[in-house]
Image (spheres, grey):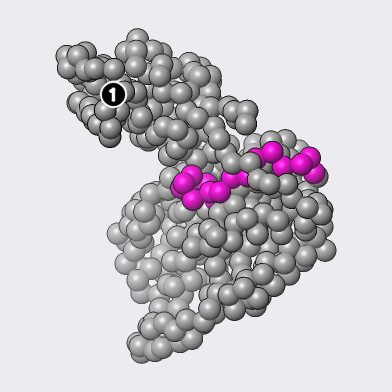
Amino acid sequence: MAAQYGHLQFFRRMPNAYLARYFKSKAISLGMDFNELKENDADAILQSFLKLPEEQQAVVEADFQDINALAFDGGVKALVDEAAYHDEDDSFAQAISEIESFHAKVMWAFLGYKCYWRGASMFIHADSVSPSYWKKRNQLPPAIPCVEDEDIDALEKAISDFFHTKEGKGRNCKVEPYRRHNKEYFFAYPEDFAQSDVEWVSDTLKTRARHPAFEIIFVYCEEEHSLDIYAPKNTKAVPTLQKLFAQTILKLDTLPSGEIDNRVYDLTPLNDSSFEFNKTIESGIVGVVVTRLRLSLKHGVKRRIVLEADTKNNPQAVYELLDELNLPEHHITQISLKVMFEPTVDNPRGKTRRFNITHPNSCALNHSGNDAVIRDMLAQSGIEPALQPD
C-alpha cells in the first residue's frame, strides 16, 4: 500500500528531473533550476512551492496525492494491467520496468499515459476494499458479458430506476467498465441525496449544496461463473443488483436461486508445529510465522483460548507455548500469520504482510499484488479452500 501523502516526503521520493517535467507540463514556475538543485532537496522545493498562488497549489497537491496513491508495487502492477488491455506489444510494461523508483515510474505514467490512469486507479480502489465488504454469488449460468455502450446504458438505467423508485435517490447513474486479466469490473455511481457542506472558498467559509454519488462495484468472472458486489450501506439491495446485472450485462431472463460462497478454510494442519507452507522461489516469500492462535475447546460451550508469544527471535514461540500448556482437545478457529518477502531495490528490508484467517471462511487478504501471491501459497499448502459441494 502507498505511504501516506506529505509534501516533504513526496519531494524526497520524486527525482528532480520528474518534478521538473511535471511543473513544465503545467506551465508553473517555482523560480528555481532543478538541474542545479541538489537531488531531492525537499526543503528548498517546499519553500518555493508554498509561494505559488493558492489555486495552483490546490491543483498540484491534488495531482501529487493521486500520483502518491499509485506509487507502490500494486499501483505499478495496476498500471501495467490496464496498459496490457490496450498495448499489445508490451512496450509500456518494458519501459516502466526500466525506471528505478515507484514514484518516478508513476509520475512517468501520469505525464505520458493518462489514458491508463483512471483504470489503474479504479483497480487499486477495488483492491483496497476489505474482503468482508464483498458479497459473492457463485455458480451463475455460463454467460459472456456484454459491454457495448448500449449494455452499459441499460445497466445505468436499471440501477437508476431501482434506487429512484425504491428510495427516491439515484436519479442519475454513471457506469464505467474495465477489464483486468479474466475479470470484468463495473464501477457504478448513482446519484445520492443532496447534502449541504461547510467549506472554505479562498478565505471565506461558505455553505454549499451538492449531489454526491454513492458507489457500487460489480466484478464478474466468466471462468468462475461468479459475481462479486461491493455496495456499502446498500447490502439489502444486493440480490436485486445481482438480477439487474444478470439481465443487462449477462442477458439472462431469470436468475436461479443464488448459491452462497460456502468455502471453508481448513486450519487443522496448523495444529502441527512442524507444518510447512508450500512456498516457491518465484513467489518471493522467504518466511511464514504463526504469531497468534485462537482455540475453541471441543467440550463445553463458548470456551476459547488465545495464544500469543514474541516470535521476533523465535518463530516457534507460539507452538512452544501451546505444548507447555498441554490443553484439552480443541479446534483452531483463528490464526494470525506474518509473511515475509525477500528484499528488493525499492524495499531493501523486504515487505511484511500480517493478516488473520478465521474459520470458516474469513480471510483478510485481497486478490492482487502480494496478497494474491500469499493466497496462491495458501492454496498450494491446502489452506485456501476450494468451493464445496452443496
Q: Give how far across and how far down residue 135 sits, in percent.
A: 56, 48
Residue 112 can be seen in this image: no
Seen in the picture, residue 196 relative to 319 is either above or below; the reply is below
119 sits to left or right of 50 = right
Seen in the picture, residue 38 relative to 84 is either above or below; the reply is below
- Residue toward you, 335 or 375: 335
- Residue toward you, 49 or 304: 304
The quarter of the picture where the N terminus appears is top left
- Residue toward you, 63 or 166: 166
Quick check: is 54 in the magenta stretch?
no
Q: Give how far across and how far down residue 301 sits, in percent.
A: 28, 32
Q: Which residue is depicted at the point 55% across and 74% down?
A: 192
The quarter of the picture where the C terminus appears is top right
Question: Badge 1: how crowded within 10 Å, few (<14), some, or many (20+)?
Answer: few
Q: Which residue is depicted at the point 63% across and 28% down?
A: 389
Q: Of helix, strand and loop, which one carries label 1?
A: loop
Seen in the picture, residue 181 relative to 121 is either above or below; the reply is above
Seen in the picture, residue 141 relative to 280 is either above or below; the reply is below
Q: Amino acid at mark 1?
A: His
Return the residue found at the far top. 274
Return the residue found at the far left. 324
Q: Give how far across and how far down residue 63 sits, in percent.
A: 50, 63
Q: How many marks overall?
A: 1
Q: Which residue is depicted at the point 71% across and 59% down?
A: 244
Quick check: is 130 in the magenta stretch?
yes
Q: Give how far across and how far down residue 102 sits, in percent.
A: 48, 44
Looking at the rendering, the stretch of residues picked out in magenta corresponds to 126-143
Residue 299, image quadrant = top left
Q: Which residue is mark 1?
A: 299
